[in-house]
Amino acid sequence: MPFLKKIKFPTAHTVLFLILAIVSLLTWVIPSGQFERLAYDSKNDLFIRSSVDKIIELPATQATLTNLDIQIPLEKFTSGALSKPISIPNSYTSISSRPQNLVNFIQAPLKGIMQSADIILLVLIIGGLVQIVNATKAFEAGIAWLGNQLQGKEYILIILVMTLIALGGTTFGLEEETIAFYPILIPIFLAAKYDALVCIGTIYIGSSIGTMASTVNPFSSIIASDAAGINWTEGLYGRLLMLILGLIICIAYIIRYAQKVKKDPRSSIIYSQKEAIEKKFADIDFTKTIKLDWKLKFVLFLFASCFIVMIYGVSQLNWWFLEMTSIFLAGALIIGVLMRMNEKLFVQEFISGAKDLLGVAFIIGIARGVTVLMEDGQISDTLLYYTSQITSGMEKGLFINVSYLLYSGLTFFIPSSSGMAVLTMPIMAPLSDTAGIDRSIMVNAYQYGTGLFKFINPTGIILASLAIVNIGYDKWLKFVWPLVCIIAILGILMLTLSVYL
């Protein structure tokens, strides 16, 4: 029908507002409920048991944990490995319904923006830094040099970038931080005759497969193992094999698409946006060769050093967004001084760069608003309770795969990997015992399930990533859906083999 051709897929912001509306309606349909929580008070060496209407102090002993059916060693709490409150098994109770009305709906994205202020500030500062480096012409010179080095072998760039980002994902949960890489790498991929989807896919899918098969990631594999009462090394080899196989599949998938686009640009899923995207990066002239002199090399070195220091700080020094943002701001100031930029020009360029990522920043905040509605509506625990009821008593092969798929669905409502771990693992780990399955396999099912949905999760950072080049979510789904199906089947095979071998 002719009028259907005029209908366009909505923007990322509108998609998120539609999701907000759906979640608001769900709070009117799904009953509110809550598991009791147990937290460790290190200052007073006590356990704090909290429910809807009361808080009780309990002795911090193994006997207390046993009486609460929590099969976790005491030292997991006292050492600080479990710093967040965990769910207490068999403690779910229904509470008064808390449906979210129109006022809550309007306030949710605003609360989300306020709660995401740290990552929003990081994104804006990175935008400013990128524009400062761009103004020095260092990117143009670097891209020209890299193009000469990789001429005819541009696919090596895909392999290197995806592998490095996957390593960051599997070791310390490199995810939100990847927002910083798009403005730098998109021009490089365009210069290699690929489309912007190749760049976004390389970065985002690299992060997704890395976090899906987290090996030593403290925010998923380690905290989930602690919450399950096991050592994080249990199940490590299975996760490592999943990482290797998944990474090979993802690299092959991206290269296959990239080579097809390079051979025939019209085969690109976003071919209709080709001119608009290239125009967006028109200030970087791919045909003009600028000499990469020592000063521009030093600018690029300082720029790259910001990321190296950030990665080291996050993985080794327990840095978070304040420290990361400080590094990028310091980098912009140092580069401005080094290149003797006029004060007025520096401010104009920095603000211009931050402005370019303002839309991305809003998307991050609005996405957080979905979680705000879930928390205020008190339906997350209800979904977990019914999930545990569904899987109880199943045959072990069916149990582990249903758990895997249910975890994938729960990720829409609980996008935080650490939050998912402490909320669900004390409930799901004992269920795996009754099914005759090792708890380490349940930890892997949690990781594979939450990681699988992140490939397409609209409440994650994919919409913010796509917004950088104004690519619609529908185009991303068309691009990534076959890969998601392949990775889903790989997860099923890995889990099935692990419970029977």
Image (cartoon, rainbow, N blue to C red):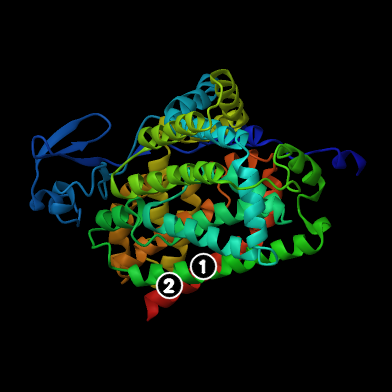
Residue extending farthest to the right is 2
Residue depicted at 83% across the width and 56% down the height: 266
| Amino acid under disc 1 | Gly
Visible in this render: residue 369? no
Characterize the local packing of mark 2: few (<14), some (14-19) or many (20 or more) Cα atoms within 10 angstroms.
Answer: some
- Camera-nearest residue between 4 and 101: 4
Q: In screen coordinates, is 285 left or right of 300?
A: right
Examine the image and state in which quarter residue 243 appears: bottom left
Residue depicted at 58% across the width and 28% down the height: 358
Q: In screen coordinates, is 471 left or right of 156?
A: right
Across and down, in percent, residue 354 comes to: 56, 28
Q: Secondary structure at mark 2?
A: helix
Visible in this render: residue 256? yes
Q: What is the C-alpha distance between the residues marked 2 and 1?
A: 8 Å
Across and down, in percent, residue 188 comes to: 65, 51
**Where, quadrant-wise, is the C terminus in this rendering?**
bottom left
Q: Which mark is residue 241?
A: 2
Residue extending farthest to the bottom is 501
Characterize the local packing of mark 1: few (<14), some (14-19) or many (20 or more) Cα atoms within 10 angstroms.
Answer: many
Q: Which mark is residue 213?
A: none
Across and down, in percent, residue 97 comes to: 42, 30
Examine the image and state in which quarter residue 162 appears: bottom right
Residue depicted at 23% across the width and 43% down the height: 83
Sequence-first tag of 2 and 1: 2
Residue depicted at 27% across the width and 62% down the height: 232
Q: Secondary structure at mark 1?
A: helix
Across and down, in percent, residue 409 comes to: 50, 51
**Where, quadrant-wise, is the N terminus in this rendering?**
top right
Above or below: residue 36 compared with residue 143? above
Q: Which mark is residue 246?
A: 1
Q: In screen coordinates, is 246 left or right of 145?
A: left
| Amino acid under disc 2 | Leu
